[in-house]
Amino acid sequence: MIQPQVFKANDIRGVISGEHPEWDLDGARAIGAAFAAAFGLEGREFVMGRDMRAGGRELSLAFAEGARGQGASVLDVGLASTDGLWFASGHTHLPGVQFTASHNPAAYNGVKFCLPDAAPITPELMARITELSYVELPPVARPGGYREDDLLGAYAAHLHGLVDLSGLRRLTVVVDAGNGMAGYTTPAVLGPLDVEIIGLYTDLDGSFPNHPPNPLEPENLVDAQRAVREHGADLALVFDGDADRCFIIDERGEVVSPSVVTALIARAELAREPGGTIVVNTITSRTVGEVVAAAGGALATSAVGHTKMKAVMAAHHAIFGGEHSAHYYFRDFWGADTGMLAALHVLALVGRSGRPMSALAAELPQYEASGEINSTVSDPKAAMAEVAEAFAGRGEVSWVDGLLVTSVDWWVSVRESNTEPLLRLNVEARDAGTVAALRDEALSIIRKDRS
């Protein structure tokens, strides 16, 4: 069973438990067969991983059964963060499949796909998987094989080879794994370093008993903020469920904007490779563009989403990219996103500078931001059109990734979510008063009753 709504723009994501599941083991088996057929994997191998969510092992094995029936062989790496699966794809040069629902609630599970070397899946391939999932594909004469391997150690070694971690002062670091995959990867990656780790919720538990696995929501950062203050830590790393995103908390217990993190890593990468290209979203802070320009780099813009970011990274041979949601992309990591590598860069910057995280952030150009504000809207396109009409004549309007209105001192962005029935509002300006006024004006339009 597969309900159509589980097929998203770039992946599969849906409820697997409760009274109204949206897909099940039979659905996973059908999707596995469709994946193998769409990718033309008869006689070829792909790599498969899963996070700690309930049903992950059973769903992945059912998927593998369907794929093997179409002649595809499976390299199962077992438990893996999503960036661990990207690594596995790059390391083996195989297409990849990761079972995860990222930051979604515990009732969800899903599938992310990639081409060999962690390259993004195309819209055409995603559409083909969707179509073939509803076709009863006859099994081929010679089914594919199945083998297992553990690549966690190789993943950690690869990350260590991408950052200069020598000569750092000893740091005290809070790691909030949120009962997600960072609880699995942190010992392998950070364990060998001269770092005192204060772990929060490092036990793997797909029911997420302590807080939801979404660090984009401020309430899910509170425990890490408190721990930083209580322990006098240098910073905190807060990961989402599948550990491909990482939020940073400074030594004061304050959240560091992902745009600030992007700017700091971009500056460091441009010092290593002058003139390189950095990729951002339309809703990334202007701070990043100013820092990149000052460092002699070039800026490229992508729509939100890991498949789109990866494609722009590849097109520009970009050295680094960052999203407002704390996804960070590295050319030396096959252009894919990895929260743990971003964390290592931040540790290197703080450990080598001798200054606290807040001081590094304070050096950068300063802007005020609303943060991402989500609204459930019955007619998202009508709402965006009304916001565009209200702001007409006050700034430059573009529709590259939803609605973006840009003025000299501010911008307003309204976009549809790729994974949830939401409109997402972001506002940035030079002062908090302007942010508040623009935010309230846009929200009054977005949330008005259209019945």
Image (cartoon, rainbow, N blue to C red):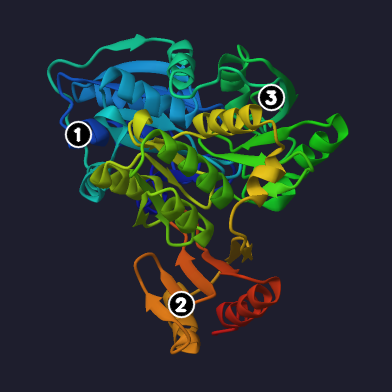
| Residue underneath mark 2 | 384
Per the image, label 1 sits on a secondary structure element best described as helix
Between 62 and 328, which is closer to the camera in this rendering?
A: 328
Q: Amino acid at mark 1?
A: Phe
Residue 286 image position (x, y, % from top left): 50, 61
The residue furthest right is: 230
Q: Please state, as top left, top right, bottom left or bottom right, where the N terminus lies in the image.
A: top left
How far is mark 3 from mark 2, CA to CA?
A: 40 Å
Of the numbered discs 1 and 2, the one sitting upstream in the chain is 1
Dot 2 alpha-carbon crowd within 10 angstroms: few under 14, some 14 to 19, many 20 or more: many
Query: Quick check: can you spot residue 366?
Result: yes
Per the image, label 3 sits on a secondary structure element best described as loop
* Count of marks, rendered view: 3
| Residue underneath mark 3 | 202
Residue 188 image position (x, y, % from top left): 57, 15
| Residue underneath mark 1 | 39
Q: Amino acid at mark 3?
A: Thr
| Looking at the image, residue 64 lies above or below residue 338 | above
